[in-house]
Amino acid sequence: MIQQLLPVLILFVVVIAFGTGMILLTTLTGFKVRATQAKENPYECGVAGQAPNSTQIPVKFYLTAISFILFDIEIVFLYPWTLIYRETMPEAGLYLLLSMGFFLFVLVFGLFYEWKAKALEWD
Amino acid sequence: MGADQFEIAVNLLKLIVIFLAMVQLVPILVWAERRGSAFIQNRLGPNRVGPLGLLQLLADAIKFIFKEQFIPANAKPFLFKAAPVIALVPAALAFAAIPLSTPVEVSTFELFGRAWGPYVFEIQTVHMNVGIIYILGVSSLGAYGLLTAGWASGNKYSLLGALRACAQMVSYELALGLSIVGALILYGTFSLNEMVQLQEGPLAFAWFGKQVTVGWLPNWGIIFQPLGAVLFLTAAFAESNRLPFDLPEAEGELVAGFHTEYGGFKMLLFFMGEYGHMLVSSALFVIFFLGGYGIPFLTQDTVFQSLLNNGFSPTVSSLLTSLVFLISFLMKVFFFLWFFIWVRWTLPRFRYDKLMDLGWKTMLPWGLMNLFVTAIAVYVMNRG
């Protein structure tokens, strides 16, 4: 397992080294311009920014994240199921098909409920 | 990694070369994008620097290096600098697990007064038997880079852009994950290498327990999974934040989204991440639905044998075979990269609520249906 993942680890180090190295290099080579108050402000379309920068975030994003976790776990269950379903096709195929069908039915019902409860609406 | 020095050296070299090739592809893709957009919009595009404007890449690179490295007063300096690197990592790591071509078999040879045993080098950085799970897992880390950038910039546009990007990426990840479950049932493996081998030869499938072969069609996944292919491609556009789903950087509303405050080389690193995602998505599409590096009606053995018969040594013919299949793979991938550019300059942008509707209310149910139909069809067809 470690043997198999060693290249990934090395590549990870290489990528981090490449990224930080280039950022450090360009900090050295880049032009230096004296910073002014106006320049250092957060970007705004030509007018001075008004409200503080920490804006409130719509709760919709949180809801989306929660629904994502729910359905992503479902897909995580589906992946190993496909292999087992394929391997044990002649003997256990129908049993596996029905049990996964029941599991998905519960989740599709959940999706349907979410839909009807207007949890998927953006307005 | 290998057992002796030669194998370790070659594997390390391969790792660096594949990573740098991915990085080097970015300026070329930017050039293709600019020329392509000009072509589509009936303009000229960059054509001044060098032939066809190709030296524009070099000019841009020099400009990126000498740009001022500006950090806004509101930003969190460390995270602001770290975010571009975090954005680059997932794409580079995901690309490492993609099989680019057939393995090269090197037979025994003499060097520095000793014999070096036979080797098999695969044209991919890391061979994984759970390749697809690894790639999906790693590439979904891309959201962290965007979120870090948006939060560390200290700018409202950046933060909103990053949030939109994350919500969009997680929503379409569901569709992306579901769209390939049907294909996984068909292949019965997680290994990308095995998937490519399964798609070799003419179209063959079980029809109510009998084996049917259609000689004039390749055995490609897109023939069994057309709906899955469409869903996958659509989700890939959303995952790599490309038009028509580039809401995170919708210029009309959010200036430039999560990279509003970025410039110079940091911006380029974000570009590498984005184009890297495009590359990985195109490569995955090709592997899942278009036979990977395979060439229709030609198997690896046929090419290898005909090269052997023409008087090449086994090592050289193995190398040349690998090159032929690499070119085949790159041609397919480049077509899809061009397709990404083509679509970007053809379709208008979605509205955000429509985008979320498409992800949750259209693609998710269709993906589930595709899964049901495939599972039942595979069961019935194999049972007879």
Image (tube, coloured by chain):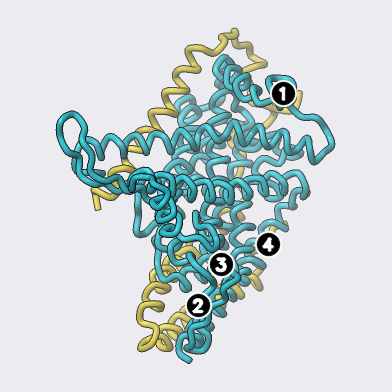
Chain colours: A yellow, B cyan
**Neighbourhood count class around disc 2 (C-alpha, 10 Å): few under 14, some 14–19, many 20 upward:** some
Outermost residue, bottom side: B384
**Neighbourhood count class around disc 3 (C-alpha, 10 Å): few under 14, some 14–19, many 20 upward:** many
Say if B41 sits above or below A81 in the image.
Answer: above
The answer for how far apart the CA atoms under marks 1 and 4 are is 37 Å
Q: Are marks 3 and 1 on the same chain?
A: no
Q: Is residue A46 left or right of residue B102?
A: right
Q: Chain of mark 1?
A: A
From the viewer's side, name the closer residue of B325 and A24. B325
The answer for how far apart the CA atoms under marks 3 and 1 are is 61 Å
**Residue A81's image quarter?**
bottom left
Where is residue A22 drawn, in percent x and y?
Answer: 46, 23
The answer for how far apart the CA atoms under marks 3 and 2 are is 33 Å
Where is residue B158 drawn, in percent x and y?
Answer: 61, 36
The residue labelled by disc 3 is B218
Q: Depth-wise, is mark 3 or mark 1 nearer the camera?
A: 3
Q: What amino acid does circle 1 point to?
A: Ala
Where is residue B86 drawn, in percent x and y?
Answer: 46, 37
Mark 2: secondary structure: helix
The answer for how far apart the CA atoms under marks 3 and 4 are is 32 Å
Q: Depth-wise, is mark 1 or mark 4 nearer the camera?
A: 4
Of mark 3 and mark 4, the one earlier in the sequence is 3
Say if B53 sits above or below B351 in the image.
Answer: above
Q: Chain of mark 4?
A: B
Say if B169 sits above or below B156 in the image.
Answer: below
Residue A104's label in the rendered image is: 2
Mark 1: secondary structure: loop
Residue B358's label in the rendered image is: 4
Q: Are marks 3 and 4 on the same chain?
A: yes
